[in-house]
Image (spheres, rainbow, N blue to C red):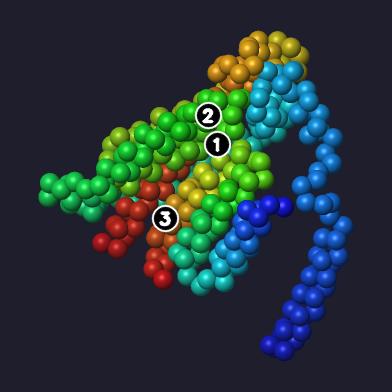
Amino acid sequence: MSLLQVVLYVFIAFLGAAAVFSKRPVNQLFIYSLFGMMLALLFFVLHAPDVALSEIAVGTLAVPIMVLVALMKTGDKT
Amino acid sequence: MNLRVRTWVYVTSAVVVFGVLLYASGGLPPFGSFSGAYTDYILRVATVERSVLNMPTAINFDYRGFDTLGEEFIFFASVSGVLLLFRALKTKAVRYPEPMESERSRGQTGAIRLFPVGLLGFTAALGMDLGAHGQLTPGGGFQGGAIFGSAIACVYLGLGLLALTKLTHRSTFDMLEAFGAFSFAALGGAALLIAGSFLQNVMPLGQTGATVSGGTIYFLSCAVFVEIACGFAVLMIVFLRQTRETQEDEG
């Protein structure tokens, strides 16, 4: 396991926990999208660029936009 | 259950689950080693058999093309479901000025508006590039399509919702999405008629490394690109339109 992989694993574990433990949905969403970005980097480092590209499109763009609009729609201003 | 009982239930189950996980992780193969015979086989034969350089694409659109057909229709069904749900929520269209519109009426333009528009071209080009070279480099119909379709968010960010609704024609995207999904199944069906098995690679493979190569792999990838790109575009349009309707509710 290279140093870069270890750093990414630690980062992902930290961000995953942060997303679970943060109270406000909007914060969770931004942490989640950062989490997705790190996950994409990890996939790339692990020689899976195809998966990384899908993760970038879905995890950092499509899901955050949908959830953001849903939060707006449900009137959750917290 | 009172707090004490709940705490005990949690502690016991946490200890058991963590113990089992720890025990199981001891039996994992060492990091980076993988003993899948299928992987080695595909890596050995795919370039020779199918003139394809990117193995995931060869698996997605040829060796396991049938699985992709299923995934494609899962996506199609999800987009249809979203459209169905939001159709029921349709409210009376009341126009409210958007931040960007008031800015435009004051005759101001800013980097914040121009930057996403510049990104639109870049993102769309990147999506097409990834979609068109799936058999050569990482990427393919799904990845390229998702990035291409998401480029539509740049229109919203830069020019606002009014421009988004004026510049895009949602029902065209709807139809193109269905067309992409249909093309995938139709190409598979055509192979069934010609060669006797569904989704068989019946077209000439072309030269390894050429832009159009890999036989049906290239065309299946294009079909998926059209479907995913238009599906994402429809999702973006439908979801972003909801931001306007929230304002209506509040207004």
How far apart marks 2 and 3 lie (CA) works out to: 28 Å
Q: Are marks 3 and 1 in contact (CB under 8 Å)?
A: no
> What amino acid type is highlighted by mark number 1?
Gln
How far apart marks 1 and 2 lie (CA) works out to: 7 Å
Give the percent coordinates (x, y) of residue B38: 81, 33
**Label 2 in the same subunit as label 3:** no
Location of mark 3 (residue) = A69
Location of mark 1 (residue) = B143
**Label 3 in the same subunit as label 1:** no
* Quadrant of the frame with the C terminus of chain B: bottom left
Q: Are marks 1 and 2 in contact (CB under 8 Å)?
A: yes
What element does badge 2 sit on?
helix
Mark 2 — on which chain does it sit?
Answer: B
Mark 1 — on which chain does it sit?
Answer: B
Q: Is residue B30 left or right of residue B204?
A: right
Q: Residue at x 31, y 40 (%)?
A: B117
What element does badge 3 sit on?
helix
Q: Residue at x 42, y 55 (%)?
A: A69
Give the percent coordinates (x, y) of residue B187: 62, 19
Q: Is residue B181 visible?
A: no
Q: Upstream in the sequence, badge 1 or badge 2?
A: 2
Q: Is residue B241 visible?
A: yes
Q: Nearer the viewer, residue A46 or B157?
A: A46
Location of mark 2 (residue) = B131
What element does badge 1 sit on?
helix
> What amino acid type is highlighted by mark number 3?
Val
